[in-house]
Image (cartoon, rainbow, N blue to C red):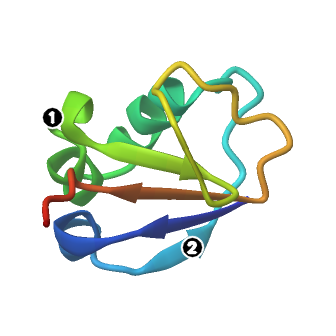
Amino acid sequence: MKVKYFAWVRERVGKAEETIEPPATVRTVEELIAWLSGRSEAYAYAFEKPKVIRAAIDHAHVKSDAAIAGAREIAFFPPMTGG
């Protein structure tokens, strides 16, 4: 699956996107964040506060307990503000 990173998540990870193959035990967005966090210090830093990270699966915003099975793209970004 393709993973995209936006704003300070991208800056901390050091890349805008990548293609990954998480293990079969990684079934939800929350588990994916935990798995990514274990990849390196940069990922751990990017996801150090997982509850503030927002996610979208195939362009639809989802909660952290959303299943990732069949996802073509998952995007991670910080909370957005605006008006």
- Residue located 50% across and 69% down the image: 4
Q: Is residue 15 left or right of residue 19?
A: left
What amino acid type is highlighted by mark number 1? Lys
- Residue 20 is situated, as x and y percent measured from the top left of the image, at 65, 59
Q: Is residue 1 above or below residue 71?
A: below
- Residue located 28% across and 43% down the image: 53
Q: Is residue 77 above or below residue 25?
A: below
Q: Is residue 26 above or below residue 44?
A: above
Q: Is residue 42 left or right of residue 82?
A: right
Mark 2 or mark 1, which is nearer to you? 1
- Residue located 13% across and 66% down the image: 83
What amino acid type is highlighted by mark number 2? Glu
- Residue 52 is situated, as x and y percent measured from the top left of the image, at 20, 37
Label at residue 49: 1
Q: Residues within 10 Å of mark 2 (few under 14, many from 20)?
A: few
- Residue located 57% across and 73% down the image: 18
- Residue 64 is situated, as x and y percent measured from the top left of the image, at 46, 26
Label at residue 15: none
Residue under numbered circle 2 = 18
